[in-house]
Image: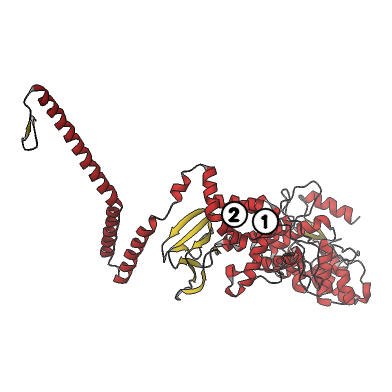
Amino acid sequence: MTTVGYGDLHAVNTAEMIFIIFYMLFNLGLTAYIIGNMTNLVVEGTRRTMEFRKSIESASNFVSRNRLPPRLKDQILAYMCLRFKAESLNQQQLIEQFPKSIYTSICQHLFLPIVEKVYLFNGVSRETLLHLVAKMKAEYVPPREDVTMQNEAPEDVYIVVSGEVEIIECEMEKEEAVVGTLQCGDMFGEIGALCCRPQRFTFRTKSLSQLLRLKTADLIEAMQAKHEDNVAVLKNFLKHNKRLKDLKVGGIVMEGGEEDGDPKNMSVNLLDVADTGNAAFLNELLRARLDPDIGDSKGRTPLHIAASKGHEDCVLVLLKHACNVHLRDTNGNTALWDAISSRHHSIFRILYHFASISDPFTAGDLLCTAARRNDLTVMQELLKQGLNVDAKDRHGSTALQVAMKEKHQEMVNLLVMNGADVIDPNTYEFSPTTLNEMVKKREIGHRITVMTDNEPPLKEVEGDRHVGIVGKSCRGIDHPRVSIYRGHPLMRKESSCMEPGKLIRLPGSFDQLINFAGLDHS
C-alpha cells in the first residue's frame, strides 16, 4: 500500500507513506461504491423483464402440463405480452398517493371534459359531475380483454376515454356475435346498474383502451343526492334506450316518451317498466316523482299491468309510492280484478288489504261484478280467498241478488251452494221453484268452496289490529265455516222443511254453538 499504480509513485518519507495509504483506501471505497451502484441500476432495470420472463415460463409450463392446443397457447402468450406493455401506462396508483384536493383537481383536469360528453350526464349539474369524477378510477385495458361478462352482476359502470370496446352477444350453442362498438365518450354497464339486472352483453376491448370505472353504489348515491339531477339522468337513460331499442338493450324497449323530456311523457315509461317486472328501475322512476297512476289508451295503470303479469315486487313498489288501487280501466276492471282473474293470489291478498281499508265495499263490489258478468271462474276464486258471500256492494246489493236479477242460473246455484242467504224466493222474477230446489240440494248435500292448503284466507281489517304489508293479520285466526239449521234432521226430512240454514264461523266450543244457535233461531 506504499505504492500507487505500477510503483512509479512511491513514498520516500513517512508523510508520503501516510498520504498514499489513505489515498488508496479512499480509491478502493470509491471504486466499490461506483461498481455497486452500477450493479443496482442494472438489476433494477431488468427486474420487470425478469418477472415477465418468469411469468412467460410459468405460462409455457402450464400449457405443456395441461396439453392445451397451440392456438390457445398463442393467445395466452400474446395476452401476457400486451399486459406487460400496458402495465406501465396505469398511473392510478401514483394519483391516489396525492391529497384529496390535488387528486380531485387532477381528475377534474383529465376526465371532466370526457364525462360531460357522456349521454347519461347531459343536463346534470356541475356539482354532481365533480362528485362523480372524484369517484372514478382510470384503467388501461389491453386488446381482446373482457371488461364485463354476460350475466355478470352489475357492480361497475365504465366510460370509454380512448380506444374501442365491442358489444358481444353470447348465446348458448352459438358463436359470439358483435352487435355494436363503443368509442370515446360512450358508456356501458349503466343498464345493469340502474335496472339491477345482470349484464346482457359481454364488453370486450378491441384495441388498447383507457376506461373510467365508477362503482354502481357511487352512481346511485349521486343521483339521489339531488332530485333535479336524478330526473335528468333517468330522462337521458330513457331517451337513449328508446333510440337503441333495435338492440333490445337490457331487455327494455321504451316507447311513448317525447324528446322534450316532459314528466308526463316520461311517466308513460312506467307502463313499460311495470310490464317487464323490473321493480328496481320502477322504484327509481317513482323516486323521481313520476305519476304512478298514469294510464295507457285503455286506462290500464302500472298497477293493472303488474297485477295481471304477476310482478309482486312491482306491486309493492307502486303501493309504497301511494298509487290508487281503486282506478278502473275502460273495461271497468280494477287491479284487484286483474289479479284474481289471472290467479295471482298473493298479489290479490296484498291489494285487497289496501283496498278494504279505504273502501268497505271492496268485497261486495268484486262479488257483484263477477255475478253480473256471470264469471263462474272468478267467483270461485273469490270465494276461495274467503270473501263473505253475502257482502254488499256500494248500492246495497249482494252477489246473489245481482245474479237473480240477471237470471244467471248457474251463478245463483254456485252462490246458494256456498251458503248465500236466500231472503225472498220471489225476488227479481227468478223462478222460486228452481231456487227452492237449490236450497233443498244444499241441505241434502251441502258443499262449500274451501280454500286450498297453500292459500291462506284473507283477514278482516280491524281498527286496532296491526296488519303487515302483505295483508296478513298478526293476530288473525283462520276460522272454519259451518251451516246450522232449525230442527232435527230426520224431522226436517219427514216434513220436507225448505227453511234455509245459516252459514257461520265454527265457535270455539260446543256450548258456544248451542248458545249461538238458540239466540239465532229463537
In this view, the residue in front, 175 or 35, is 35
Q: Disc 2 versus disc 1: distance between alpha carbons?
A: 10 Å
Left or right: 340 with respect to 243? Answer: right
For mark 1, does the 10 Å Cα neighbourhood hold few (<14), some (14 to 19), or many (20 or more) residues? many
Q: Position of residue 209 (x, y in %)?
A: 45, 62
* Position of the C terminus by quadrant: bottom right
Tell me which corner region of the image, top left, top right, bottom left or bottom right, holds residue 216: bottom right
Residue 318 disc label: none
Q: Position of residue 73 (x, y in %)?
A: 30, 67
* Position of the N terminus by quadrant: top left
Q: Position of residue 80 (x, y in %)?
A: 34, 61
First in residue order: circle 2 vs circle 1: 2
Q: Position of residue 301 (x, y in %)?
A: 75, 67
Residue 230 disc label: 1
Q: Which element type, helix, strand or loop, lies under badge 2?
A: helix
Please give the name of the residue rendered at 84% of the width and 77% of the height, measured from the top-left corner: 408
In this view, the residue in front, 358 or 384, is 358
For mark 2, does the 10 Å Cα neighbourhood hold few (<14), some (14 to 19), or many (20 or more) residues? some
Q: Are marks 2 and 1 in contact (CB under 8 Å)?
A: no
Q: How many marks?
A: 2
Q: Amino acid at mark 2?
A: Leu
Please give the name of the residue rendered at 51% of the width and 62% of the height, measured from the top-left corner: 160
Disc 2 marks which residue? 219
Left or right: 353 with respect to 158? Answer: right
Q: Which element type, helix, strand or loop, lies under badge 1?
A: helix
In this view, the residue in front, 486 or 447, is 447
**Compared to 63, does 404 lie above or below?**
below
Left or right: 495 with respect to 254? Answer: right
Tell me which corner region of the image, top left, top right, bottom left or bottom right, holds residue 275: bottom right
Q: Amino acid at mark 1?
A: Asn
